Image (cartoon, grey):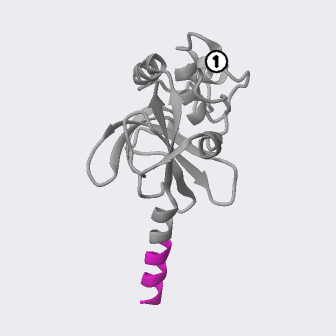
Amino acid sequence: MKKLILILICFTWNIQAQERYEIPCKSYLFELRMDSLKTQIGIKEATGKNDGEVLKYQTVFGIRKQPYCKMLQDWAFFVNLRLHNDAPYHFNPLAISIYGFAQKKGLKTIYGGFVGDLIVWRNKGQVTGHIECIDSVMKRGWVMTIAGNTSNGKSGSQREGNGVYRRQRNIKHPLSRILQIRGLVGFKIN
């Protein structure tokens, strides 16, 4: 019984700690970014070592063969920029970096997922994590995402997979005991 109470307290704390922030984004960029992400679904690594066609996401940062979940999201903005200063945030390959930016510069909103939002997970006690973009919203916190550096969902890793896939996630639940939801980053269209 004590274990059940402890689990419920931890679960409740995790939900209460989740927040959503919005940052400004040009409407043309938001739409083109979503279109670009959809075209990437099904792209796979050549040998399972963050290589092959997925290297194009990493070229934005001048690096190779690194985890690319965040780089996919940044690439989708980058390839559609009309002006460099239209970027809604500073591109950075670290998955949790955008959440910190949104906390400082964004507007705090009610926690709930919307199409185009980024779900940010953080490894407990680390600066690493995982990130995915919400593609559609279902009931009770369930969403479909477009995710890079993950598996197809039938087998394999949740966050160190072999390509770009659609995944079903819940914005109220962690990915694992280690990957806890940090929060959501949305975009206020202007």
What residue appears at the point 41 percent right and 20 percent down from the top-left corner? 31
x and y, in percent, of residue 40 in the image? 45, 22
Task: Tell me the amino acid under the disc marked 1.
Answer: Asn
Magenta span contains residue 11 = no
Is residue 89 depicted above or below 179 in this figure?
above
Is residue 53 depicted above or below 119 in this figure?
above
Q: Is residue 186 left or right of residue 136?
A: right
Is residue 118 depicted above or below 57 in this figure?
below
Q: Residues within 10 Å of mark 1 (few under 14, many from 20)?
A: few
Q: Is residue 159 visible?
A: no
In this view, the residue farthest toward the right is 62
Q: Is residue 117 visible?
A: yes
In this view, the residue farthest toward the bottom is 1
Magenta span contains residue 4 = yes
Q: Under tag 1, what secondary structure?
A: helix
The mark tally for this picture is 1
What residue appears at the point 56 percent right and 35 percent down from the top-left corner? 69
x and y, in percent, of residue 114 in the image? 37, 40
Q: State the residue position of label 1.
A: 85
For the record, the magenta segment spans 1-10
x and y, in percent, of residue 161 in the image? 52, 39
* Closer to the camera in the image, 178 or 49: 178
x and y, in percent, of residue 163 in the image? 50, 31
Of helix, strand and loop, which mostly describes the magenta segment? helix
* Closer to the camera in the image, 56 or 10: 10
What residue appears at the point 73 percent right and 25 percent down from the top-left corner? 63
In this view, the residue farthest toward the top is 82
Q: Is residue 14 left or right of residue 99?
A: left
Q: Quadrant of residue 125?
A: bottom right
* Closer to the camera in the image, 63 or 85: 85
